[in-house]
Image (spheres, helix red, strand yellow):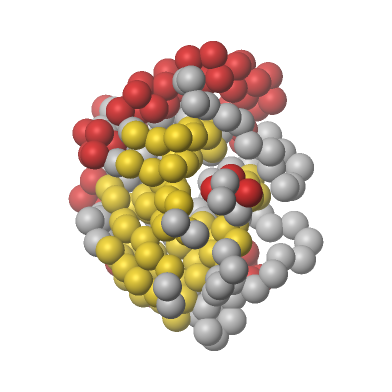
């Protein structure tokens, strides 16, 4: 199985994973049109472009399991909320995932995603393959221990790594495929294209995924 065949980029940091058993969303945001029911939703942190109650309500019902950081549990209106912390492993009806740290360490960004908040990225295992969704993060030491078949890395700068830092992160993470996310609405169309070209030029196993929705270049 090629892992990229089971993962669809909705846009921004939002993805849907289709397996033969379950449908899993990560940080669903600005879902346009009809999207099928979510069995599981993974939320990295409570910022509105990652924890969108409006979008969760479109795809969740009372049986949907929603995993999210401990400080966000009370915000969920539908589904069954389950709190997570960095460094955990979870199993849910055959779906296995780990939580990993996601935080800022660059001085100008420390306020955006403080390490003390316990926000997360995820390493999800699907059909014998693994996916690393980094969440909103800087280049952090913990990345050196991460191994996954595919890695999704935020490169918008401002609140997360910029493209140069993503290139450096790709050199620390062990992965078969690296793909950027969380940048178009922050950089705009022209700067996004420049960042993509630099990323593809410098990251040997880098790819730019196609979004299943029209790209959004502003919030």
From the viewer's perspective, tell me whether residue 179 is left or right of residue 138. right
Q: Relative to 8, say whether 67 is above or below.
A: below
As drawn, the residue found furthest toward the front would be 1
Q: Relative to 11, say whether 68 is above or below.
A: below
Residues 151 and 52: in front is 151
Residue at (59% x, 68% y) in the render: 20
Q: Quadrant of the C terminus?
A: top right
Residue 102 place in picture, x, y as percent: 32, 45
Q: Relative to 47, say whether 155 is above or below.
A: above
Residue 123 place in picture, x, y as percent: 38, 52
Residue at (69% x, 25% y) in the render: 189
As drawn, the residue found furthest toward the bottom would be 62
Residue 21 place in picture, x, y as percent: 56, 72
From the viewer's perspective, tell me whether residue 199 is left or right of residue 141. right
Do we see residue 111 in this rendering? no
Residue at (60% x, 61% y) in the render: 18
Residue 119 place in picture, x, y as percent: 32, 53
From the viewer's perspective, tell me whether residue 54 is left or right of residue 80. right
Residue at (57% x, 64% y) in the render: 19
Q: Relative to 195, say whether 132 is above or below.
A: below
Do we see residue 143 in this rendering? yes
């Amino acid at each position: 199985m090629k892992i990229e065949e089971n993962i669809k980029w909705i846009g921004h940091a939002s993805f849907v994973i289709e397996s033969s058993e379950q449908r899993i969303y990560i940080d669903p945001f600005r879902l346009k049109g009809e999207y099928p029911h979510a069995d599981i939703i993974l939320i990295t942190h409570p910022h509105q472009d990652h924890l969108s109650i409006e979008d969760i309500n479109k795809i969740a019902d009372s049986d949907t399991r929603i995993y999210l950081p401990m400080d966000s549990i009370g915000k969920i209106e539908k589904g069954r909320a389950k709190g997570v912390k960095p460094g955990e492993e979870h199993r849910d009806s055959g779906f296995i995932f780990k939580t990993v740290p996601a935080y800022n360490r660059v001085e100008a960004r420390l306020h955006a995603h403080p390490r003390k908040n316990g926000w997360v990225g995820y390493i999800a295992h699907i059909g014998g393959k693994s996916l690393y969704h980094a969440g909103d993060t800087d280049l952090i030491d913990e990345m050196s221990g991460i191994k996954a078949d595919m890695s999704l890395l935020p490169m918008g700068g401002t609140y997360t790594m910029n493209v140069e830092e993503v290139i450096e992160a790709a050199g620390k993470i062990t992965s078969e495929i690296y793909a950027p996310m969380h940048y178009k609405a922050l950089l705009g169309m022209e700067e996004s294209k420049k960042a993509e070209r630099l990323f593809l030029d410098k990251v040997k196993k880098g790819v730019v995924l196609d979004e299943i929705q029209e790209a959004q270049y502003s919030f």
